[in-house]
Each structure stands twice: as structure tokens, then as C-alpha cells.
Image: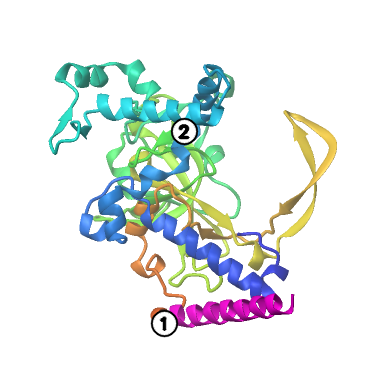
């Protein structure tokens, strides 16, 4: 929807299509919580969530591996009634998962409920292969603030000037980095890192958008005695660690800083990221200051990005085939994608509430429902009368 053609937005149906798209996407992100801090705040759809559980349970993302499950169920069939047999096999898998994971079920026709024995439940807790086959496995344990070094083939050691400073940029360095570290950035050799882990345990790489905390001073200026922390948004340009002491705690992140608009975009209803001045602003911060990643999309409508034929790559080679693609303009303006599900709850915590607060499409919702119902009733009445008249003629 970030690259919709203007012709689709000018007519009435195109405008309604965009509004429907936005409403469905905003609702999906609003209901997406990977952890519930306050149940009363989360219960937007009270009855459905109380009875059915978290909305996150019904994501299609977790069913990607079911292609192999369907295939295995199909292989082990007699192919007399494939659809019925596959449905029965999957139902049996769900029953087994419910039982070994400690779920309760009604005993016979009585009102009492029973569950699997303690030995069965302990087997599920300790048997990693069984957990993996039933779709439940412990996630990777990532330590926030750690840095992954580049491979030996990509290992590069540079000075601060080469590794950080660029023409036409304004560099600021986090005051806590200078005060806490045993080295001075300008006097240290650095090596490029492959990735780092944010406070949310997101793996961050170059080119990713992040929210981060900064307390800065100018490189050639005086360090503030009590630097003030400010949460900002930006794009990671480089991750570096000292070559002499490649400890993850001493890693630095160079982030191109963007300001967040005070009001959402009128068309897409999303916050806008823009450059605060003509120069590129680079914040150099400790890796521990990176909070979480988010998705940002270029403002192609304002930048007037062009659609052009682009050569198709097959593996690492150019081919003679072409396909339509977007050539982004030079304007550095982006949207914070409020429809993305990853870290949707964290984004809502960071941004002011008016960016994520649901806005009614119609002020009088009940009146509009009645209006639509009257129109449908009128149409159905006309159809019945036309059908009756046609029946009399024949």
C-alpha cells in the first residue's frame, strides 16, 4: 500500500479500498501482543479474547511448517478419502498435543475433567524432540548488548576517521561512552561487526531501523556533567568494536538520526520520519542503548519515486529479463510502518497514543449500520418484487 498508484486513490472505489486496507491492518497490529502486561487494556474484543485466547494464537505465521505435516499425512494414506483422512490425522495430532502439554478434557459424559498423568507431562517438558515435532521449542537465548564479529573473510580494521566520519555529516557521541570506556574513540582502531542484540533481543544489522537511547555531546565539545537521555529513531549505518579489545560490551553503533513528526500522515495515518537539518546526523551510541527494531518504508508519494524496468538477478548474475521496480528518489523521508506486527506493542509504548488510537470512520456508527441495513432491505424488496412479476408473466 506504500506504492499505490495515484489513479487508485482518485476515484471513490480506490479511496474506499485504501480505507478498508488501513482499517484491517491497523486492527491486526492493535490486537497483536506477544506479552500481556495489563489484561484490562488488552481486552479490546472482550468476549472473543476471553473465550478464544490471544489473537496471536491464530496467526498464519506459525502454520508455515504445516506443508510438511500435510505432505506426511498424505503419504501415509490409502488415498480413498484424502481430505477426510488428513483432517482426522491433524485432529489426532491436536488432541495429542493438548493431552501431553497438560490440557484438561471432560471424562466421558460426566461433569468432571481429567488430564494426563505426571509422567506424561514431565516427558513433554524434558523431551526436546517431542517438543519440536509438536511445534513447541525453546527460543534461542540471546543476551542483549552482545555483538557478533564479522567473519575472517570480511574482517576489516580501520581508524575512527575511516570507520565513522564522512563528508557532510555531523557526528555526536554518547557522553556515557566517553566517560565509562577506557579508550577514546578517535585514538582507537576499530573493526566492523556483523550484528548486535538489542534490549528486546532483536538481532540488529546494518540498514535496520531502530529506536535507541542517546545522551550525547559534540566530539570536539565539552561533555555534559549530567547528560540527558533522549529516545530517538534512526537507521543503523555501522556496528564497530575495538580491534584491540573485541569485547561485546565495548561495541558502538553508528545510527543515522531521524526526527518523528508530531502528527501522522494525512493519507496513511502513520508517523513520518524526516531529517532534522540539511546535514546527515550520526549518533554514536553503546550497543546497550539500542532498544528494538521497527519497519520503515520510504515516502514514495512525496518523493515522487518512479516505476522503471529493472534487470532481474538470478543468483548473483544479471539476466536479460526485466521487471517493474521502484527507483526511490533522493528525499530522505520515511513512514513508521504501524501495520507491521513485529514489535507492534513496543512501538505503541514508545510513540504518543494519538498515533495508534483507533479513529472511527463514521461518527454515528449505529446510524450508519441502520442506513446500510435499510439499503440492503430495499434492494432485496425490489428483487423479490421483480422475481414475483417475472413469475406471473411466465
Q: Quadrant of residue 364?
A: bottom left
Q: Label 1: which residue? A: 363
Residue found 82% across the figure and 43% down from its top: 322
The local crowd at label 2, few if under 14, some if 14 to 19, many if 20 or more residues have their Cα within 10 Å, is: some
Magenta-span inclusion, residue 275: no
Q: Label 2: which residue? A: 195
Q: In the image, is 350 to the left or to the right of 119?
A: right
Residue found 47% across the figure and 31% down from its top: 87
Q: Where residue 282 sits in the image (x, y, percent)? A: 49, 51
The local crowd at label 1, few if under 14, some if 14 to 19, many if 20 or more residues have their Cα within 10 Å, is: few
The N terminus sits in image quarter = bottom right
Q: Residue furthest left?
A: 112
Q: Which residues are magenta?
A: 367-394
Residue found 54% across the figure and 45% down from its top: 165
Q: Nearer the viewer, mark 1 or mark 2?
A: 1
**Quick one: SS at disc 2?**
strand
Q: Where residue 59 sits in the image (x, y, percent)? A: 43, 44
Q: Where residue 211 sits in the image (x, y, percent)? A: 40, 51
Amino acid at each position: 500500500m506504500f506504492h499505490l498508484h495515484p489513479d487508485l486513490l482518485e476515484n471513490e472505489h480506490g479511496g474506499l479500498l485504501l480505507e478498508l486496507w488501513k482499517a484491517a491492518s491497523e486492527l491486526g497490529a492493535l490486537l497483536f501482543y506477544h506479552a500481556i502486561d495489563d489484561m484490562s487494556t488488552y481486552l479490546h474484543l472482550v468476549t472473543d479474547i476471553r473465550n478464544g485466547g490471544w489473537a496471536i494464537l491464530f496467526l498464519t505465521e506459525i502454520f508455515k511448517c504445516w506443508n510438511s505435516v500435510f505432505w506426511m499425512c498424505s503419504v501415509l494414506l490409502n488415498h480413498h478419502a484424502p481430505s477426510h483422512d488428513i483432517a482426522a490425522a491433524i485432529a489426532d495430532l491436536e488432541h495429542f498435543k493438548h493431552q501431553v502439554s497438560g490440557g484438561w478434557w471432560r471424562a466421558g459424559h460426566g461433569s468432571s475433567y481429567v488430564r494426563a498423568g505426571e509422567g506424561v507431562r514431565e516427558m513433554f517438558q524434558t523431551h526436546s524432540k517431542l517438543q519440536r515435532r509438536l511445534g513447541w521449542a525453546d527460543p534461542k537465548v540471546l543476551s542483549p548488548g552482545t555483538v557478533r564479529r564479522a567473519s575472517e573473510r570480511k574482517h576489516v580494521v580501520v581508524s575512527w576517521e575511516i570507520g565513522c566520519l564522512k563528508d557532510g555529516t555531523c557526528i555526536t557521541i554518547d557522553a556515557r561512552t566517553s566517560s565509562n570506556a577506557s579508550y577514546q574513540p578517535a585514538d582507537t582502531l576499530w573493526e566492523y561487526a556483523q550484528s548486535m542484540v538489542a534490549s528486546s533481543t532483536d538481532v540488529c544489522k546494518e540498514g535496520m531501523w531502530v529506536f535507541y537511547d542517546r545522551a550525547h555531546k559534540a566530539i570536539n565539545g565539552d561533555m555534559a556533567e549530567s547528560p540527558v537521555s533522549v529516545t530517538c529513531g534512526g537507521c543503523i549505518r555501522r556496528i564497530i568494536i575495538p580491534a584491540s579489545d573485541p569485547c561485546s560490551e565495548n561495541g558502538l553503533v553508528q545510527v543515522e538520526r531521524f526526527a518523528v513528526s508530531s502528527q501522522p500522515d494525512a493519507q496513511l495515518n502513520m508517523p513520518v520520519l524526516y531529517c532534522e537539518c540539511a546535514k546527515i546526523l550520526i549518533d554514536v551510541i553503546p550497543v546497550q542503548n539500542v532498544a528494538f527494531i521497527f519497519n520503515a518504508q520510504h515516502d514514495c508519494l512525496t518523493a515522487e519515486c518512479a516505476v522503471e524496468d529493472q534487470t532481474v538477478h538470478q543468483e548473483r548474475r544479471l539476466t536479460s529479463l526485466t521487471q517493474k521496480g521502484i527507483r526511490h528518489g533522493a528525499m530522505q523521508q520515511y513512514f513508521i510502518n504501524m501495520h507491521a506486527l513485529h514489535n507492534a506493542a513496543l512501538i505503541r509504548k514508545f510513540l504518543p497514543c494519538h498515533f495508534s488510537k483507533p479513529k472511527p470512520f463514521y461518527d454515528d456508527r449505529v446510524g450508519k449500520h441502520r442506513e446500510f441495513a435499510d439499503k440492503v432491505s430495499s434492494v432485496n424488496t425490489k428483487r423479490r418484487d421483480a422475481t414475483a412479476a417475472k413469475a406471473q408473466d411466465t
